[in-house]
Amino acid sequence: MTRRDSLRLAAGGTAGALLGGGAAAPARSAPQETARPGGPLPYTGANLAGAEFGPKKPGVIPVHGQEYSYPHANEVDYYASKGMNVFRIPFHWEAMQHQVRQPLVPEELARLKEIVAAITSRGLIAILDPHNYARFHGKTIGSPEVTAADFAHFWEQLSGEFRENERVWLGLMNEPHDMPDRDWLAAANAAVAAIRKTGARNLLLVPGNHWSGAHSWVRSSNGEVMLRVEDPLDHYVYDVHQYLDGNSSGSKPEVVSPTVGVERLRTFAEWCRQHKKKAFLGEFAVAANEEGRVAIRNMLSAMEKDRDVWVGFAWWGAGPRWGEYMFTIEPKNLQDRPQMAYLRPHLQPVSLAPRAALP
């Protein structure tokens, strides 16, 4: 468990503003900034968290409705009303498939399908995100207990369920780390091959090793190893994450400088441009403070200028289980969180949000 996960779980509770069976009341908006030149990137949204909550202990499967839950359709409506059109849906691999090579758990698959349908039926994009850090019941992919073939089997089953829906993007794994580079590359390529074997043509989001940090991508082995991703359709983008505190972990409210986000993304964007690759910023966030506001403005404006590289972003995080977590944009008492105002100039106009053009 990362330090960011520890903070998230400590927040606990349920935001509650948008839960329940009825339609959500509109949140009162915070003051907005001026839109940036060039306009927003095409795919801008948030992580709708909740299904990845609960213990990550080997052999323990969290209890749905108690330790974790999926977002609701009215969550989607709220964020779409702000101009968001892409939603990353983190979930537990272990809840979806209790043991390797077993069938997917029907009840869990149904829960995932319900929120995916709520997103894609509105013309928006859903990103599937097994939020496991390249682990399964505590064992690293590439180990004897969890092989690359086991991971591929999981993705063959899951992608087969969504292959007819082009508005579902497949994020292979959240933040692989502390494993041999060759093992992650082998696992990623095995998963890609298994997905394409089903006939699925969905866009793939491929992370690197080393937490998939944008700031360390080039100086780590990702800059070399991840060029060897093999997709017969060549229909993938890299999924990278970037936080703005001292060690890029997203565990502290501090922001190093107003330009730290620009600086930490620059080398990665240049690498993508050099190799004619594209990328999606799957996680980023700041706490509600002036330093964070300015840093987000500068970083997202730089990404909009580098739109030949960046296809979009997803804030960490949204969803109903955050409580007072420092990065949440879940509305409280029907009022927007301050960070929503940081994002609004970089989201699609509301009239355009319900239909995201496909790549």
Image (cartoon, helix red, strand yellow):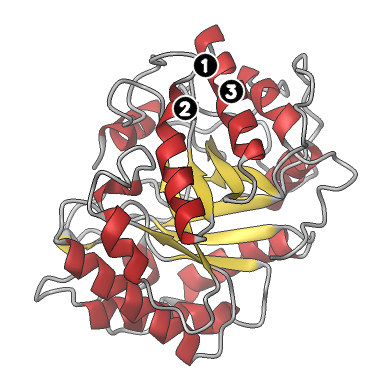
| Percent coordinates x, y for residue 82 in the rendering | 77, 36
Which quarter of the figure is the N terminus placed in? top left
For label 3, the crowd category at 10 Å Cα-Cα, with few meaning under 14, some 14 to 19 and many 20 or more, is some
Q: Which residue matches tag 2? A: 261
The label nearer to you, 2 versus 1, is 2
Q: Say left or right for 239 vs 94.
A: right
**In what quadrant of the picture does the C terminus appear?**
bottom right
Picture quadrant where residue 257 is located: top left
Residue 148 marker? none
Q: Distance between the Cα atoms at labels 2 and 1?
A: 10 Å
State if disc 1 and disc 2 touch (CB < 8 Å).
no
| Contact between labelled residues 3 and 1, with CB atoms less than 8 Å apart | no
Q: CA distance from mark 1 to mark 3?
A: 10 Å
Q: Which residue is mark 1?
A: 292
> SS of the residue at dot 3?
helix
Q: Amino acid at mark 2?
A: Gly
Foreground disc of the pair 1, 3: 3
Q: Quadrant of residue 125?
A: bottom right
The amino acid sitting under disc 1 is: Gly
Q: Which residue is mark 3?
A: 298
Task: Give the image location of residue 280, x and y in percent.
Answer: 53, 51
Q: Residue furthest left?
A: 144
Alpha carbon separation for disc pair 2 and 3: 7 Å
Q: Earlier in the sequence, mark 2 or mark 1?
A: 2
Residue shown at 32% from the left, 46% from the top: 217
Q: Are marks 2 and 3 in contact (CB under 8 Å)?
A: yes
Crowding at label 2, few (<14), some or many (≥20) Cα neighbours within 10 Å? many
Between discs 2 and 3, the one toward the N terminus: 2
Comparing 127 with 181, the one in front is: 181
